[in-house]
Every structure is written in structure tokens, then in C-alpha cells.
Amino acid sequence: MKLFKTALLAAALTMPLSQHVLAATPDNVLVVAQNIDDIVAIDPAQAYEFSSGELVTNIYDRLVQYDAEDPTVLAPGLAAEWEADAEAKTITFTMRDGATFHSGNPVRAEDVAFSFARVIKLNLTPAFILAQLGWTAENVDQMVTVDGNRVVVKYEGDFSPAFVLNVLAARPASIVDEKTVMEHEENGDMGNKWLNSNSAGSGPFKLTAYRPGELVRMGANADYFKGAPKVENVIIRHVAEAATQQLLLQSGDVDMARNLTPDQINGISAENIKVETYPQAAVHFVSFNQKTEALQPEAVWEAARYLVNYEGMTESFLKGQMEIHQAFWPKGFPGSYDETPYTYDPEKAKQILADAGVETPINVTLDVINSTPFTDMAQSLQASFAEAGINFDIIPGTGSQVITKYRERSHEAMLLYWGPDFMDPHSNAKAFAYNRDNSDDNYQATTTWRNAWAVPAEMNDRTAAALAESDADTRNAMYVELQKDVQAKSPIIIMFQAAYQVAMDKKVNGYVNGATSDFVYYRLVTKD
């Protein structure tokens, strides 16, 4: 029977669209096929998975937030305005008038203070993002206070107000309805159990049904302060198999398929289906552990930048999945540096090594996650680097095996990727341009420490200064200069920025998919 079903599905996928009996989704409902089995929690104080982040963004609001109209601009959310005092390390937010939760309760300054304190006191996975501001369970009630319709936020550390605002735009800073949540508190959990199957937000959609591993249904909030969504409902059907998603899209049973493979995307020929490509925040790199003597010369770092067949990969097996990007902050956000000065030039690489007196061959291992497209990328690097006498012995492993070696600094060369925890340039600058203490017993979750690169003191100072800079334009310019320097001289060779492709019915418009799962918006979707 299983073989029969597999054959039937294969036949359906290759059948011309005209031979399908087409279904049709309702005009006022967006139906999405998506693998959502990664969801562990949907409470904003706990949600840390990709799919749960999408739900939180569409159901809840924050004081300040990146919005559907332009996900690259930090805009007012539940706060109408704010005033920062960098010297006093304080930001005062004035609440928006008229905003209400889905329950009908007004959004109050007290709900903000409760929501922030709740994250810190529950201390679940994403709490570290808010804890960066110096907040603890013991002091958060003094660090976040209410003054009428204003919220006064205090922070500790040499941070610019811009950094603090980006922290407060992150997922765990979502505002929940205190009265509704605390009506469902059990054993001091501050409503955590209830919020993992219900919602208490003020966002453009409200959760109307949630069946883990099966379905999410969100209904439009007609009273949303930025305008009601264009569709009345969004239904996300859990469909684990990409082939099944493709079949459902082709047959008209869903409007959108979120997890098709590149081969499936390339094979789409139906006239009623379109494919949209969205840049993502993850950057992919190959790095050299500075504990490996052969990888220490700066000439090796420079030559390596000319030994990546960038276009060869992005025009073949990476097409649609990645685009060339050679700086640590992703394109599409303030502070990004988008120039790509390096191209595949093995002759130039050989000359750089010869001029520096570097002896070849250099034989090192290259750790890689044992799945596509990473193994294909590793094989491409193996072939192109060999042109200049740098020979990679590829060591495939599970994701956990590769990450463990990376954290232990026991690798030689590493092929991996990095994504920011929240959309502030410092999230990546700290990872790629900062490492004051390179000692083995000073573990840091950064690419610099994990590659044992003792970042020059001057660069460390500039990274710290950018974090503290209060003028937004000046701060962004500082991050651009840091990226130029890391791009030119570091043992971390950034090659690509990830891209994400979504197949959808041509009548679907207004879908916004930003650089992370926190930037997926359904509010503007129409079905014309």
C-alpha cells in the first residue's frame, strides 16, 4: 500500500495542471502549507523556534517594532513616541492611545512592565535577550517602571539607545495582556502553560485554533490600530513533506507552500503559481582555526577570498538558496555593507601566497554538516582551494557533532553559518569583530573566539565604541567600517547570505517575509 501511495503521489506531481481537478480556497482565507513541527512553545516568553516566531510576530505587538510596510525600519508599535537619555541610560516610552488586546482590555503601561518582568522572572530560553540590559529577577521591577501612560526603561551597560531599542523590538519583548494571562496562572507559572495553547496579544491576528503538529488558525483583528488585515483568516496546515506541499499547491488546496526544495521550485511550470525570493539574515562562511599553524598567515586568509567559486555555486546548486554576500551583517538592514569585491581568481591567490613566502601544499581538515547544500559547498571549496595548493580533507558530521567541535576549538577549517539573535548590528559585530580574551577557559559564543582569533585591540575598541554610539547614522557608519576591515583581513571568509523561496498562487499579494522568522507578516496579504 505504501508503494502504491508513493507512486500515486509521484504521478500526481508530474501530471499537467490541466488534468487536476482544481480546488479553491475561500477568497477571505489564506491557507498555507508549512512544516511547523519545530514549535515547542508559543508563549512569547518561551518561544524560540522559527515557526513560533512567525506566530508571535503576527499575534503580538512590541513597544517598537519592524513592521510589514517596511521590515527594515524600526517603527512605533504600542509606544507612540519615546525619549532617550543616553547619559542616564533611560528610555521613556509614551503609550499609544486606543490600542486594545484581543480580549477587549486596553493596552496599559502596566502590561508592558508586567510583560518584561515576566520574561526575566520565568527565565526561559529567550530571556537572555532582555537580560543583556542588566535586568534580573531581583531588579527588573525597579528597572522598568510606570508613570501614568508612560513606561520608563532603565538599562545597565555601555549601550547606545539604538541597541536598547532593537533589543526591545525582539520577540521576547512582546506585550501580553496581564489581566487575561494572570486569570490562567497555575502554580506560579504566570500563565505560561495557558499561553502555550492560547494567546493574549494585541496584534493584527488573534489565535483562534492551535493543534500542535497539525494546524494553526489565526483570525483577523478588526480593531487593529494600524488597520485590519486584508484577509479574515490565516490557516497554517502542518505538512511535513515538501512533495505533499507541492501537490496541495498545484491542486489549489493551499495558497502557499513554504518548504519546497530547490528542485521542486525549479520544476514549477504551472501558470497560476509564482515563486518569490526573500533574502535571509544568515551568513555562510568558511573559517580557519588559529590554533592551526598552517592557517595563521594573513596571506592564507587573503588568498582564500579568491579561492571561493562564488558564482559557480550560486548559479548552480545554490541558485535560489543563497546570494553572494561578503560582510558579516546581512543586506537589507541599516548598517549593512553590501560590496562584494572578491571573485574566484586562483592565479591571484597563488601569487599572494608566493609573494608572502607561504609554502604549499597546505593540508587541513574541513568540518561540514552532512546534509545538502553544505556537503556540495564543501566539495566545491575542496576543488577550488586545491587550485592554489590548499587541500581540504572533508569531515562530514551531524549538526551537533560539527557545532561541538567548533565550540571546543578542535577543528582546523570549518564551513558553517551564523544568524543574529536580534536585528541589531552588534549581534553580529560581537561575533565577527570582537574577542578581547582569547584564552581557552574564557568560552565565548562568537566566531572569533571559536576560531581562536585574537582580534586586534583597535578593532575590539571600535566594536565597543559602535555599541555605545548614540547617533544612529554615525553608529551604522561605524559598523560599515568594521565590516570592511573584517572582510579584508580576518580568518573568517564570509561568502553568502541565505535566501528563502516561497511558492504561492499568483492571486496572493502582499506577503512579507523579512530576514528572520520574526519578520514574516500576513497583515497585508490579499487574494486578488
Image: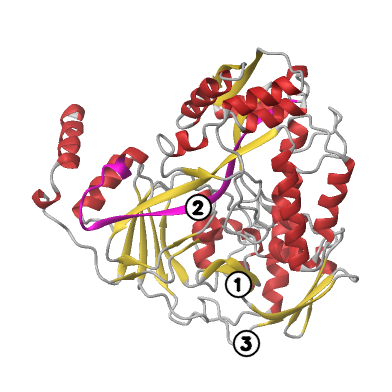
The residue tagged 2 is: 279
* CA neighbours of label 2 inside 10 A, class few (<14), some (14 to 19), many (20+): many
The amino acid sitting under disc 3 is: Asp
Above or below, comparing residue 122 to residue 381 in the picture: below
Q: Residue 164, image x and y in percent?
A: 76, 64
- Disc nearer the start of the sequence (1/2): 1
The residue tagged 1 is: 177
Magenta segment's dominant SS is strand
Is 272 included in the stretch rendered in magenta?
Answer: yes
Above or below, comparing residue 415 to residue 124 in the picture: above
Q: Which mark is residue 386?
A: none
Spatial separation of the CA atoms under disc 3 and disc 2: 35 Å
- Disc nearer the start of the sequence (3/1): 3
* Badge 1 element: loop
The residue tagged 3 is: 97
- Disc nearer the start of the sequence (3/2): 3
The amino acid sitting under disc 2 is: Pro
